[in-house]
Image (cartoon, grey):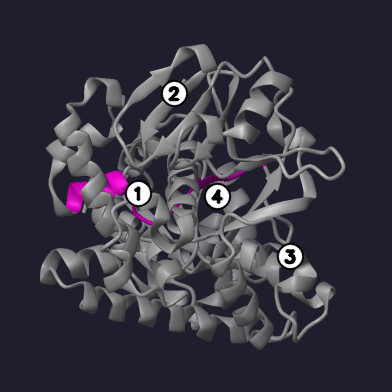
Amino acid sequence: MKRMLEKQLLEWKESKRRKPLILRGARQVGKTWLVENILAREFENFVKIDLEKMNNLHIYFEGELDPKRIVNYLELSTEPITPGKTLLFLDEIQACPRAITALRYFYEDMPELHVIAAGSLLEFAFGEISVPVGRVQYMHVYPMSFYEYLNAIRGKSLAEESLKHPDNVDEHVQNMLLEELRRYFFIGGMPECVKTFSDSGSMLETFKVQSEIIESYRDDFSKYKPHVDPACLDAVLLSCAKSVGNQLIYTKLDDGHTGQTNRKAFNLLNKAGVLKKIPSANPSGLPLGASANQKRFKASILDIGLMQRLCRTPVDLELQRNDLLSMFRGKLAEQYVAQELLAHHGPELFYWSRDARGSSAEVDYLLTFSGKIYPIEVKSGAAGSLKSLHILLQKYPNCPRGLVLYDGTYKTLPEQKLEYLPLYSAGGMSG
């Protein structure tokens, strides 16, 4: 299965300014697969140290963090590690926080050795150590995007069409992509789920894998126990999955716990990459993060397939709906767009909520292309129903136009500063 990050990994390998690289992301999004199947092939030797399984090696990261000493000890348990020829992979590095600290010394004292690390729940490990700021690089790994899913299921040709501007894509092909998107809504982008569907063609088999992944996340919740009750984590995750697209209030996430406990659970799930906090922001200028209101926020889930499984959506009924935007009351569409924007455009995502007292005006997402801010609305219906988007465009003339993602083919309404894009094209949008 081809992943978009392959090119960036190979660029890291060849870079003269290379630093140790940490792959970040939730469990089972494909971090280890990328290293073993893409990057490892570029080296004469590949040494993998799984610090969760091989906890007897943690002792090598105690005391003085001299990389030459560490490498000499690791070689005793593995094989020769030769700078320039060997890729050293520290997997599940969160299990040994001192190994994260050691990365700075690999950068300073052994820069010729290619060192890559991967882990989930990294933020918890960061709380125990001095993070080597400026001495390591980070790369975020997300579930497979719609483009990556298409490449695996339908082949490169159709996948490439999904990233083209829809004005350059035949209407028949646009409709083909929208129909394939209907399946992606339920299969999602977790690599094991995509592989299961590719191999078996069975959604039921894929749903079993999704349930197994969710259970593995719930097993992880026990590791958060000193911080928050696992039952609260489970309840907050389910509540957020059912509330995608809605503004959230901590006190309402789980009636069985206080707002403060719910907030702690939400923040832990956000740190673990299982959900993503999306704050409101003011589109008057860049960077959007400077105006972000952390008290007014929405959330998306890691993966659309896991979301529909968590919510137990009646798949047979939802697949019969003609309009993708009506599926699960539009929540699957909003989740899909958030997931695509994160995968293609980076780890930050915002939306707009009007500050005026009593106002309910809200636009689904804000995104930056080439130094310009574009409001994005996920809608079915006529332009006249896009009241909030019109309010934003009038209030913030610095926004060139509004982008409307809908279950239809490409069209523009220049007099209203609107561009209608087929829903599948969320990842390929640009200014």
N-term-proximal mark, 2 vs 3: 3
Check disc 4: other Cα within 10 Å, few if <14, some if 14-19, many if 20+: many
Q: Residue at x 49, y 22 (%)?
A: 418
Check disc 2: other Cα within 10 Å, few if <14, some if 14-19, many if 20+: some
Q: Amino acid at mark 1?
A: Ser
Q: Which residues are magenta?
A: 134-152
Identify the disc placed on residue 145. 1
Q: How many numbered tags mark residues here?
A: 4
Identify the disc placed on residue 419. 2
Callout 1: SS: loop
Identify the disc placed on residue 127. 3
N-term-proximal mark, 4 vs 1: 4
Viewer-side residue, 135 vs 349: 349
Q: Could one spot residue 429 in this view of the protein?
A: yes
Q: Residue at x 74, y 84 (%)?
A: 226
Viewer-side residue, 254 vs 196: 254
Q: Amino acid at mark 4?
A: Phe
Can you give x and y, in whole percent of width and height, for residue 97 in the image?
Answer: 63, 68
Task: Find out whether residue 173 is within the magenta segment.
Answer: no
